[in-house]
Amino acid sequence: MPQKHKTTKLRFLCFRVLVAKKITMTNNDPVLIAPCGMDCRICSSFLAFDHNIPKVRHKISHCTGCRPRGKQCAWLIKRCDKLLEKKLEYCFECEDFPCPNLSRLDKNYRKNYQMSMIENLTQVRDQGFERFFENQKAKYGCPTCESLTSVHSKKCFRCGEVHSWKD
């Protein structure tokens, strides 16, 4: 099967899963929180997919999220047997939380995007999803249209407002 056909078919299947589960970035659905603590609703790749923004090689990628694709964590699964074997739903359930692999990923996100996956997971564990979603809305909500902005670019994919110098 040609690569382009495979990609189109995979995109269609992921889209069907999201539609069947009625999952979009506006939903406060725990399925959009990755095991590592990433909130798909503020990820540029998920937002590009959700808003049908065309892919551009090395600039715009698409992702439907780890859980909607039936995956665990795209970044940690190869380094974590517990995620690989689906023994955990979220990293905070592990007795080694936060492990060195999650800590390394968290350090990069704190440095580059001022977002902590460990803080996200701790908040979900201690305060629940509803409070976490409220805080995400307060932190990443677009002041123009109230949609969520990208943690990576601070751009609102709904109204096109840029809220940072990073594009």
Image (cartoon, rainbow, N blue to C red):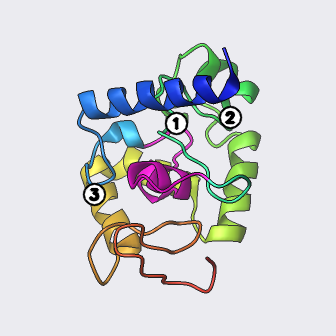
Q: Residues within 10 Å of mark 1 (few under 14, many from 20)?
A: many
Q: How many marks?
A: 3
Q: Which residue is mark 2?
A: 76
Q: Residue at x 27, y 33 (%)?
A: 19
Give the label on residue 56, or none.
none
Kind of residue sitting beneath label 1: Pro
Please provide percent x and percent y for residue 86: 54, 17
Whole-angstrom CA distance, mark 1 to mark 3, is 18 Å
Q: Is residue 82 above or below residue 7?
A: above
Most foreground residue, 123 or 105: 105
Is residue 163 covered in magenta? no
Chain-order first, disc 3 or disc 2: 2
| Left or right, residue 86 beside residue 77 | left
**In which quadrant of the rendered view does residue 157 lie?**
bottom left
Q: Quadrant of the C terminus?
A: bottom right
Q: Which residue is mark 3?
A: 131
Give the magenta-colored segment's residue range: 33-55
| Left or right, residue 107 beside residue 156 | right
Residue 117 visible somewhere in the drawing: yes
Q: Secondary structure at mark 2?
A: loop
Q: Which residue is mark 1?
A: 35
